Image (spheres, helix red, strand yellow):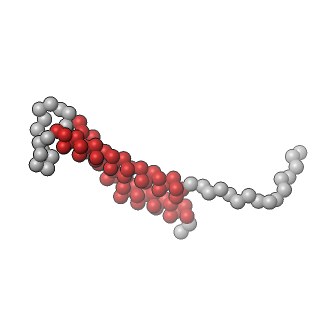
Amino acid sequence: MDKKTTGIIATVVTGLLCGCPGLVSLCFGAMYALVSQVPGAQIDMFGSSDPADALTFGIIAVLIGLVMVVIPIIVGVIMLRRKGEPVSNEPIPPAI
């Protein structure tokens, strides 16, 4: 396999294993953060009904989701970037 094929495979795999769970984490984190701000909402965060716990969990989930979404982007940029072509020492032909 050449380097470009390996880069495409690495990008797709990290997209599936990091990107998709990261998007889910972003959605659920945003939902928990928004629900913590609703007055009178019945919140049950692992046995606690404190809205601050839901807000903390939501912010942490959003941050983890952002990191997980950025990983496939970085892998894709690093693996699929074009390396500089080696400079040849041949003389440039004169313009006509």
Identify the residue at horizontal 60%, vertical 55% (top origin): 82
Find residue 88 and report its image quarter: bottom right
Of the pair 78 and 16, the residue shown nearer to us = 78
Picture coordinates of residue 51, whole percent (x, y): 16, 39
Q: Is residue 91 left or right of residue 76?
A: right
Identify the residue at horizontal 47%, vertical 53% (top origin): 74
Find residue 29 and report its image quarter: top left
Q: Is residue 68 left or right of residue 77?
A: left
Picture coordinates of residue 22, whole percent (x, y): 33, 50
Identify the residue at horizontal 53%, vertical 69% (top origin): 1
Identify the residue at horizontal 19%, vertical 40% (top origin): 52
Q: Is residue 75 visible?
A: yes
Of the pair 79 and 36, the residue shown nearer to us = 36
Picture coordinates of residue 48, whole percent (x, y): 12, 46
Q: Is residue 19 left or right of residue 27?
A: right
> With respect to residue 41, does 92 lie above or below?
below
Q: Is residue 31 visible?
A: no
Q: Residue furthest bottom?
A: 1
Picture coordinates of residue 56, whole percent (x, y): 24, 43
Q: Where's the C terminus, which quadrant?
A: top right
> With respect to residue 51, does 8 lie above or below?
below
